[in-house]
Amino acid sequence: MNVYEGLKIPPQSKKTIVSVGSFDGVHLGHKALINRLKDVGEQYNSKTILVTFDLPPRFVLSQNKQFKLLNTLDEKLSSFKNAGIDSVWIIPFTNELAELSHNRFVEEYLAGRAGVGHLVIGHDHSFGKEKKGNYHDLLRLSHQLGFSIEQVAAYKIEGTIVSSSHIRELLLDGNLVAANRMLGYLFRLSGRVVRGNQIGKLIGFPTANLSLSDPNKLIPSTGVYACLVEWRNQTFYGMSNIGFRPTLNAHQLTIEAHIFDFDQDIYNDTITLKLVQKIRNEIKFGSLQLLKKQLYTDQRTIKELFKNQPPPT
């Protein structure tokens, strides 16, 4: 897969099959659009290009500084590569780009640089300054600039439209089962293992403390989760805790994982936590002994869960 960044994109054929969007999460709705893009490319024996942004427009323009991303740029590119796209063009989203009219964006970027011959867009696609451009504007521009266009229907699960915003809400509610179903894969957090306060080791539950690779990544609600842990191309079962460790009177959010049946020194290594299901909320215990007792209960619950329902990846 070719990856082009900024405005450094070589001249493209004028019959390129193009789609454009943020693709935050690369969920099942996005994958349906990508599959259609590939089908059209094969039908016309043409190359496919996904045009996306280094950061979602909402992230750059939002006044809410708590807005976080479903996936990092590297995760997004990995999903595109696995999907079999020919090329990805990453455009830096800036305040200047946000001021560009929808007419100029199509003329300069999609037609002028991406060489669009056929455009595939999502059911709710809007673009350009103040997101005033829509399907009808694209249809008009397609006649003027000589390309064809189609709109992919909304992807639904049991009548609910799959969307990045809905998945974000589910994650913040701790509903990993529903979020993962809409994503089509297990939501993940990646980062470097750093040293903690060693309390987990003291009570028989050593943990890998995660320093996120991207601070803009969304973190689900606090609590204890069943998870898979990826380390050096190996996968282990485990349980993770996201929270403030109230039993220790700590006040800083931490992400840590206890890996089952594991005894390796992984400090400074990169690991990925794939969150399967939330087991319980974070609780303040009266002593470390009570916390230890609960952790044994959590471990039994999670091992039983994995025994009965081996998770997807």
Image: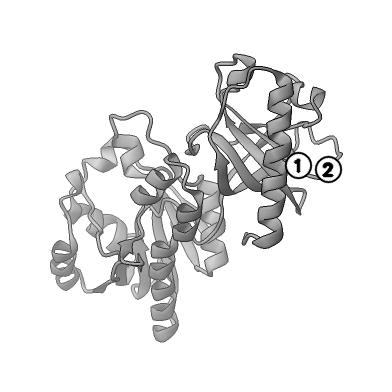
Q: Is residue 284 above or below residue 277?
A: above
Q: Quadrant of the C terminus?
A: bottom right
Write the residue at 68% across / 32% down: 294
Secondary structure of residue under mark 1: strand
Query: Which label sits on residue 259?
Result: 1
- Is 149 situated left or right of 213 in this image? left
Q: Position of residue 48 (x, y in %)?
A: 43, 70
Q: Position of residue 61 (x, y in %)?
A: 29, 35
- List x then y, in percent, for residue 172: 43, 40
Give the amino acid type for the residue marked by disc 1 in the picture.
Ile
Residue 34 as seen in the image, left or right of residue 203: left
Instruction: Say which residue label 2 marks.
Output: 262
The secondary structure type at the circle numbered 2 is: loop
Q: Quadrant of the N terminus?
A: bottom right
User: Which one is in front, 168 or 108?
Assistant: 168
| Residue 98 vs residue 152, the one in the foreground | 152
Residue 248 percent across, percent down from the top left: 64, 16
Tags 2 and 1 touching, CB below 8 Å: yes
Question: Measuring 58% from the left and 19% from the top, which residue is drawn there?
Answer: 246
Report if residue 144 is visible in the image.
yes
User: What residue is drawn where x is 42% and y is 41%?
Assistant: 173
Residue at horizontal 62%, vertical 62%?
Answer: 312
Crowd band around label 1 with a 10 angstrom C-alpha radius: few (<14), some (14–19), many (20+)? many
